[in-house]
Image (cartoon, rainbow, N blue to C red):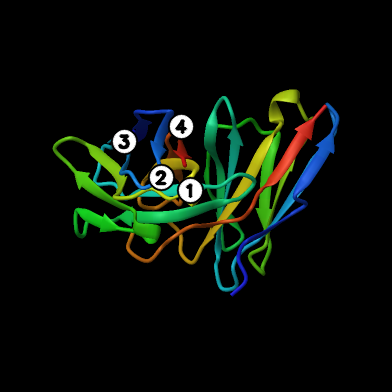
Amino acid sequence: AQSVTQLDSHVSVSEGTPVLLRCNYSSSYSPSLFWYVQHPNKGLQLLLKYTSAATLVKGINGFEAEFKKSETSFHLTKPSAHMSDAAEYFCVVSGPSNTGKLIFGQGTTLQVKP
Amino acid sequence: KAGVTQTPRYLIKTRGQQVTLSCSPISGHRSVSWYQQTPGQGLQFLFEYFSETQRNKGNFPGRFSGRQFSNSRSEMNVSTLELGDSALYLCASSSRLGASGTNNEQFFGPGTRLTVL
């Protein structure tokens, strides 16, 4: 079975400082992994995805994530936080390959202080 | 290209009523998935439709049902509403069945917020 654990429910950073949102996954097969962002009263937007190509994945808005199979981790990072980054972030693992089912982590709220 | 649209955006119903939510996928997309988002349970998969057929179903009671039309638009229905059905219902569309693979991104709509009183 597949599962995702986001290790922090809330992360607070100052504008201009690095962002680290942590995610561990469990999967019985080689998964696809995603990070989605949700701004208040908005739908989910895909930040980046890992699909067994390069282990370091670059996404939109300066975010990137590194797939580490040995640690079963897929942490999201950004070198310098911007106020507009404040949102809810979800780490997601794909279900079986013949399904569009996505399995979401519980989410991490990122607060960016001026 | 227009994104995924969901109607209505907000709904208020009372216990015991039924409700129908609509999702129009991105033009050309044939797969539509539905998710329920609540503060307690997070985001949970409801079901997935592809070419008018339900392909996968999550762990929800039979009160939750859906369908997909020949133009790929999808509706979900919840009968005999309970207070716990209050949630944000999100739909996502993709061009192919399945979430994995390089080119099969799921695009989410803004959601329908259902409040059950």
Q: Amino acid at mark 4?
A: Gln
Q: Does mark 3 fall on the same chain as mark 1? A: yes
Rendering coords of residue B44 (x, y %): 53, 36
Q: Chain of mark 2?
A: A
Say which residue label 3 marks: A22
Gap between marks 2 and 4 measured at Cα: 24 Å
Gap between marks 4 and 3 measured at Cα: 12 Å
Lower sequence index among marks 4 and 1: 1
* Snapshot quadrant of residue B60: top right
Gap between marks 2 and 1 measured at Cα: 6 Å
Say which residue label 4 marks: A106
Tell me the element at label 4: loop
* Snapshot quadrant of residue B19: top right
Q: Chain of mark 4?
A: A
Q: Circles 4 and 1: CB distance less than 8 Å?
A: no
Q: Residue furthest front?
A: A114
Tell me the element at label 3: loop
Lower sequence index among marks 3 and 2: 2
Which of labels 4 and 1 is toward the front?
A: 1
Query: A45 above or below A6?
Result: below
